[in-house]
Amino acid sequence: MMGGCQTNADRRSCQFWRVNGFQFRPTNCNQLSAHLYCAPLRFWRLPDLPVVNETNLRAIVRPTSKDTRPVNLDLGTIQLPVTAYASIAHRVTGVLNFFASFLLLWALDRSLASEASFDALAAVLTSPVSKLVMWGIASALTYHALAGVKHLVMDTGVGETMRGGVIGARIVFATALTAAVLWGVAIW
């Protein structure tokens, strides 16, 4: 007999394997080649993904947790504290400031290129849309700076409690709102 599985042990280790939809059996299934030909195919199979439902959601999301609280993945229903909103806004304004820096560098380049480009830029910046963009950039920069100062103050040990964090976040929001109004008055 040419090739194939010769013994029961070989037959157990050399099962038919499905590779890309085709059934496949190695032609030489002695002990060494069964290991070389058959074993790697076991690792090529993708594991079956579990079906997600209410009963096994906890095991998928937090498999090692002994927490019995319900898992809530609906972000619209989660009640976040004011400190979380302050932290999220600080990150968002940081990203906005990063992208606004390209616009500001372009405006600086245009203003320094020549007198004609400076006059063209000045004409563009008088439109209501560009004033709104400038107000947004100034407000985002002000909020980000105020929240950064709050973090620096907290690094010194002041306001590290939950109550102190809430008070600090409210102060930052109130000061940033006041600054945004002042920026609006100054720009328009």
Image (cartoon, grey):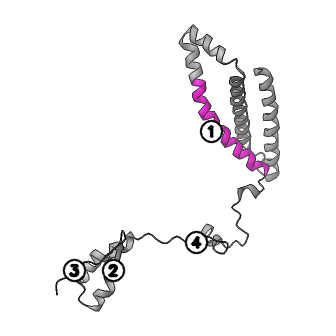
Q: Which residue is mark 4?
A: 51
Q: Which residue is mark 3?
A: 28
Q: Position of residue 178 (x, y in %)?
A: 82, 31
Q: Amino acid at mark 4?
A: Val
The alpha-carbon separation of the residues under discs 4 and 1 comes to 37 Å
Q: Residues within 10 Å of mark 1 (few under 14, many from 20)?
A: few
Based on the picture, tell me whether residue 140 belongs to the magenta stretch: no
Instruction: Point out the frontmost of discs 3 and 2.
Output: 2
Q: Secondary structure at mark 1?
A: helix
The alpha-carbon separation of the residues under discs 4 and 3 comes to 38 Å
Q: Which residues are magenta?
A: 80-105
Q: Which residue is mark 2?
A: 16
Q: Amino acid at mark 3?
A: Asn
Residue 178 against residue 56 in the figure, above or below: above
Q: Residues within 10 Å of mark 3 (few under 14, many from 20)?
A: some
The alpha-carbon separation of the residues under discs 1 and 2 comes to 54 Å
Between 66 and 185, the one lying in front of the other is 185
Based on the picture, tell me whether residue 87 belongs to the magenta stretch: yes
Residue 188 against residue 162 in the figure, above or below: above
